[in-house]
Amino acid sequence: MDAEANGAGRPILDGVKVVEFAHVIAGPLAGTLLADMGADVVHVEDPYAGDPGRTMGPMKDGHGLWWKVSARNKSSVTLDLRKPSGQQLARRLVEWADVCITNMRVSTLERWGLDWDSLHVVNPKLIMLQVTGNGLTSSARDDPGFGKVGEARSGVVHITGFPDGPPVHTGFSHADTVTALMGAFGVAAALNRRHDEDFEGEHIDLALFESLFRLIEWQVIIYDQLGIVPQRAGNQLAVAPGAVVNTYMTATKEWVTVTSGTPRSVQQIAALLGEPPEPYLKVEDQKLRTGRLDDLLREWVGASDTDSCLKAMHEAGVVASRIYSIEDIMADQTYREREDIIAVADEDLGSVRMQAVVPKLLNHPGTVWRTGPSLGADNETVFKDKLGLSVEEFAQLAGEHIV
């Protein structure tokens, strides 16, 4: 059987149909990750205002740059979900879809008949990803949620920063994006069962704080068993696997990071700095000398230019890197060899560069076929071709400003 016949080369999620009643980041990014892998994703937006994500961040010539990436590979349709006829058409989209993604307020979905109980009747095999601030089983299930609050509640912010300074949020939408990744993972797991005869759909209930909370896998058991509340430790780790983890400035005023994740790697740092090997043979002894190695390494790095410093550490088996700005990333050989930055044609801005699809699948790779579309760009294609609306039906809905 040839590759085309057995499906090789087609994106791994080709044939999976997704509808999004979602906006901004956490819900829509989950859909984008699925779309990157070939899913047919229909993004539903308000016909008057559109998704607020369209105007987030820097603009160029009136076009949101963030949107061009965050909404790539999707179809955009407009639908007034406040009106019964709009809600009815939304349910037809759910009937068409395998997956529904939403991060709207719980009470809003219930009022519109777009909650899990209602949609499960429409499509008994539906997989629904529902992102909320606090989770559907919480007494605060209907409270609004934002990613930075989720970060604060996850434990991440508490341990980020220096001991004598305030807690620090990361410089991007950390909780939103990790929630999207976990949500896409949940959807992919559920899709594995969707062809089973006894599959009765799946409802994925994900709160904004839970994904980051899960990824700090040691914080609960350490507190439970030792009563320890990890504190901010700067560039060190609150629970460190090695004795040296920090950032250092070189003589050419550039920052590098050095990490020792194993006892052997600590010994290599010690050897690089001219330390005798005996005091670094045991992990317990290494921990006692963390401060000394840190001070010696800061002095050593500070006396050398960046390239010479990194070359010497590489030769000594010490794991280190310059701290990349986006300018460094765009010029980096490894990023180039990995083809991690791609150029995509855009109807408004010409050719734009953005991240390639991650992860890379050898036999069924994802692709980027379009940037974030203009509002309602795919109304006719979706409603006529996918849902089978007649010309007259579509014209009536358009005339009533439902679409």
Image (cartoon, rainbow, N blue to C red):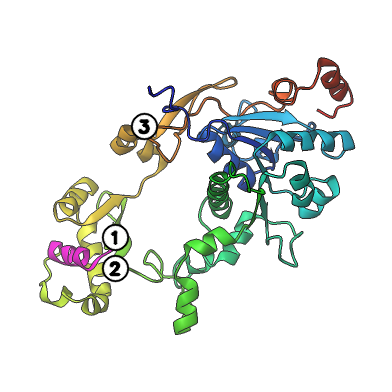
> Residue flagged by tag 2: what amino acid is it?
Gly
**Does dot 1 land on a helix, a strand or a loop?**
strand
User: Is residue 167 in sight in this rendering?
Assistant: no
Kindly report which numbered mark, 1 or 3, lies closer to the viewer in this rendering: 3
> Residue flagged by tag 1: what amino acid is it?
Thr
Magenta portion: prevailing SS class: helix
Q: Is residue 191 left or right of residue 95?
A: left
Could you tell me residue 138's position as x and y percent?
71, 66
Give the residue pinned by disc 1.
Answer: 259
Q: Residues under labels 2 and 3: Cα distance?
A: 32 Å
Could you tell me residue 18's position as x and y percent?
64, 37
Could you tell me residue 271's position as x and y percent?
13, 65
Could you tell me residue 112's position as x and y percent?
84, 45
> Residue flagged by tag 3: what amino acid is it?
Glu
- In the rendered structure, which disc, 1 or 2, sits on the residue that comes first in sequence? 2
Number of residues whose C-alpha sits closer than 10 Å to that of mark 3, classed few (under 14), some (14–19) or many (20 or more): few
**Cβ–Cβ below 8 Å for labels 1 and 2?**
yes
Q: Which mark is residue 242?
A: 2
Q: Quadrant of residue 392?
A: top right
Q: Quadrant of residue 277?
A: bottom left
Q: Which residues are magenta?
A: 261-272
Number of residues whose C-alpha sits closer than 10 Å to that of mark 2, classed few (under 14), some (14–19) or many (20 or more): many
Quadrant in which the N terminus is drawn: top left
**Does dot 2 land on a helix, a strand or a loop?**
loop
Q: Nearer the viewer, residue 365 or 338?
A: 365
Was residue 266 drawn as part of the magenta stretch in this picture?
yes
Q: Residues under labels 1 and 3: Cα distance?
A: 26 Å
Give the residue pinned by disc 3.
Answer: 339
Relative height, residue 30 to residue 236 (above, below): above
Residue shown at 27% from the left, 73% from the top: 290
Q: Residues under labels 1 and 2: Cα distance?
A: 8 Å
